[in-house]
Image (tube, coloured by chain):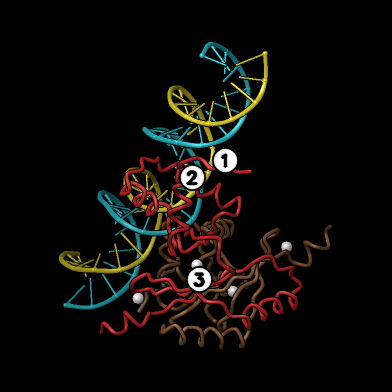
Chain colours: A brown, B red, C yellow, D cyan
DNA sequence: TTATCAATGATAATGGCTATCATTCTGATG
DNA sequence: CATCAGAATGATAGCCATTATCATTGATAA
């Protein structure tokens, strides 16, 4: 079992109390703002440990990893390439078709990552 | 128009003559094996230039970019996490559903990336 | 209390990629 | 040709997210 140290608990709480997709440095900044003095290496290690034990989940976006609550059903992401806004969605048809594709190709599917890129309505309205 | 120097032509040929998803260092190695002495920076710059002009295409996989022929219709990828084998697929249902999802969320879709992870049949048979 | 072992923090190292800059090519132009 | 300008190249330094190292601190159990 994972040892939920104070530091890790704080990290976990921050993630659990939000609906945000955190990157490591951003989370470290948020912790610092709240008065916690946690080394950046500890943040990275804490995130890895929490994820390894299923307490949070993550996905790789471009060059950085994003962390979010694990207490959500599986979903994929829509990202506005203008403002960075991230929306979540679930589409059963897509999920089902992916299973079919994998079966057709003789793959035993273990996961997938789908990211849709676009410009969100807020950004479009700004024009 | 892009200047197709000898170096860039060689890089382009290698990619076009294969069905491979090349990473930059791997391609540099292949070039060296064939007797071409091309600096690694030139390989990176050549790949970027070729892609910028639509002569090759790429997608980001984990921490490295993969380059492939541009002379293929849009497709997504299935990756064996055991042996690294990459298969391609096209699924019109998935493509259509993505458009719907984007529309529902008010996004003007510009692209997507779908990677399915799994264990390929060759790897499964080895057990 | 003591021994053990994990967690932490500061910081060095890693790895893919880009920037810099001096040098080499290329391809008009006179 | 000779010259010149701009692009391409190569060696290498720099960048940046993340991981590794290692000395120190902390928690737990005997
Ligand atoms: Mn999410
Ligand atoms: Mn492909
Ligand atoms: Zn936006
Ligand atoms: Zn395989």
- Contact, CB < 8 Å: mark 3 with mark 2? no
Circles 1 and 3 on the same chain: no
Mark 1 and ligand 2: say if the CB distance to the nearest ligand atom is below 8 Å: no
According to the image, label 1 marks what residue?
A: B3
Q: Secondary structure at mark 1?
A: loop
Mark 2 and ligand 2: say if the CB distance to the nearest ligand atom is below 8 Å: no
In space, the residues marked 1 and 3 are separated at their CA atoms by 41 Å
Q: Chain of mark 3?
A: A
Q: Along the line of sight, which residue is nearer the eye, B72 or A61?
A: B72
- Contact, CB < 8 Å: mark 2 with mark 1? yes
Question: Would you call the spot at circle 2 few (<14 residues within 10 Å), some (14-19), or many (20 or more)?
Answer: many
Can you say which quadrant of the picture contains the C terminus of chain A?
A: bottom right
Q: Chain of mark 2?
A: B
Mark 3 and ligand 1: say if the CB distance to the nearest ligand atom is below 8 Å: no
Identify which residue is drawn at 55% across, 49% down. Answer: B50
Q: Where residue B28 appears, x then y in whole percent?
A: 38, 49
Question: Would you call the spot at circle 3 few (<14 residues within 10 Å), some (14-19), or many (20 or more)?
Answer: some
Q: Quadrant of residue B96?
A: bottom right
Q: Where residue A69 appears, x then y in whole percent?
A: 55, 75
Q: Along the line of sight, which residue is nearer the eye, A1 or C15?
A: C15
In the rendered view, does B86 fall on the left or right side of A60? left
**Residue A104: which disc?**
none
Q: Quadrant of ligand 1?
A: bottom right
According to the image, label 2 marks what residue?
A: B8
Identify which residue is drawn at 49% across, 45% down. Answer: B8
Figure label count:
3
Q: Along the line of sight, which residue is nearer the eye, A91 or D23?
A: A91
Q: Secondary structure at mark 3?
A: strand
**Residue A58: which disc?**
3
The correct choice, above or below, for A55 with respect to A60 in the image is: below
């Amino acid at each position: 079992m994972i040892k939920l140290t104070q530091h890790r608990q704080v990290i976990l709480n921050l993630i659990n109390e939000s609906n945000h997709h955190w990157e490591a440095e951003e989370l470290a900044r948020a912790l610092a703002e709240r008065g916690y003095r946690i080394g950046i290496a500890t943040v990275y290690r804490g995130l890895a440990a929490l994820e390894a034990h299923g307490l949070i989940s993550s996905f790789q976006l471009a060059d950085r990893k994003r962390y979010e609550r694990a207490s959500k059903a599986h979903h994929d992401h829509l990202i506005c390439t203008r403002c960075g806004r991230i929306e979540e969605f679930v589409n059963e048809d897509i999920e089902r078709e992916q299973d079919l594709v994998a079966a057709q190709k003789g793959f035993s599917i273990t996961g997938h990552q789908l990211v849709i890129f676009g410009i969100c309505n807020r950004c479009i309205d700004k024009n």
